[in-house]
Amino acid sequence: MKQRAFEQRYAQDWQAFEALLDVLDPSVAPNRENFRTARRKNQRLSTSQVASFPEAYRRLCHYLALARERQYSNRLTDHLNSLVLRGHQQLYQRKSDLRSAIIGFVVAGFPQAVRAQWKFCAVSAAVFVLPGLLLMGLTLMFPELVFSVFDPKQINEFESMYDPAARHIGRVRDADTDFAMFGHYIRNNIGIGFQIFAGGLLFGIGSLFFLLYNGIVFGALSAHIINVNFQETFFSFVIGHGSFELTAIVLSGGAGLQLGYALIAPGRFTRRESLRRAAGSAIQIVYGVLLMLLIAAFIEAFWSSSTLVPTTLKYWVGGGLWLLVLGYFVGMGREKKHDAV
């Protein structure tokens, strides 16, 4: 194909790619007039345009390769090459920006979001922990109370799960692999976390209910395990992943209560607008909760359930993880104060 026919057929593609580059990064755009026109029209990129950028970049690389292979003019190959270089920089810069955003969220954004909504998280913790402790104490004094929470079949299953003589600690395994249980724990943990968070859409009542329910279940189970003298197995199992899993449950409740409060007290906004604003900050906590639940599932599958690890070591590691989680939310993401000169 001659150069003239090649340009007539494909020029529209690389002109569109150049216009896209000018909007994505106008600071280096050689064609300032295109960018000024776009600005005057208040042009905004759609999601589909941004998503199509990698494919458009690959097509441009193909055009450049064809132009070089067919020895078209330097003017054309130089122009295509400059577009490819700009596209390469934009493509990989955006990937780098995404990595930086993720790292920034983990290092600072997540703990800052939690501290900003500490009141909701504190209420969530109280609803989860206090009823659980109350029922735990009552069940220790009156062991038969456990039958008001669990049926006899469930109690037998729990006892087999935390029997010191068991091959694996924790859930009875359908598949005899840690990796299979890792997937099971992910599904189970995320399901509980999402349930508690989404319950906030019922004016917060759903979140309160699921927090209360899970707290009571954990309290009654803990007391029964102590009553049957399996506490060493149980608490050495729970302490490892509990710092991430239990904290994530409380934070899910805090995010859900934030949604519920936005519906109950929208202020000068409509309920829809108030919910939208609350969801913007609550979802930041949910992203972090998902990460915490993944970590909890990993620890539960590969560490907590192991019978090869000494109990004392599990307690030390578990205690260290609790301190790590606490220190993370208290200290991370705070601006350093500089002494006055």
Image (cartoon, rainbow, N blue to C red):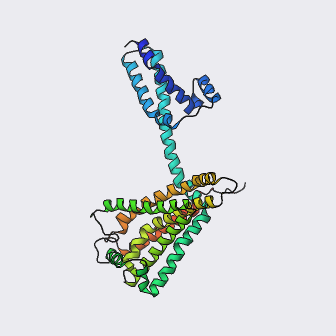
User: Residue visible at 41% across and 16% down?
Assistant: 6
Q: Quadrant of residue 170?
A: bottom left
Judging depth in this view, the residue of 265 and 12 nearest the camera is 265
Above or below residue 32? Residue 287 is: below
* Location of residue 215 in the rendering, given as x and y in whole percent from the top left corner: 49, 73
Residue at the extreme right of the image, as rendered: 341
Left or right side of 167 for 147: right
Left or right, 26 with reference to 323: right
Indicate left or right for 179 with 194 as reference.
left
- Taking the spot 56% from the left edge, 59% from the top edge, the residue there is 111
Q: Looking at the image, can residue 46 be seen? A: yes
Residue 324 in view in this figure: no
Residue shown at 40% from the left, 84% from the top: 227
Asked if 46 appears above or below 284 in the picture, the reply is: above
What residue sits 39% from the left and 59% below the top?
A: 187
Q: In the figure, residue 23 lies in which quadrant?
A: top right
Give the image location of residue 146, x and y in percent.
42, 81
Image quarter where the C terminus lies is: bottom right
Q: Is residue 146 left or right of residue 335?
A: left
Name the quarter where the N terminus is drawn.
top left
Taking depth in this image into account, of 247 and 262 the one nearest to the observer is 262
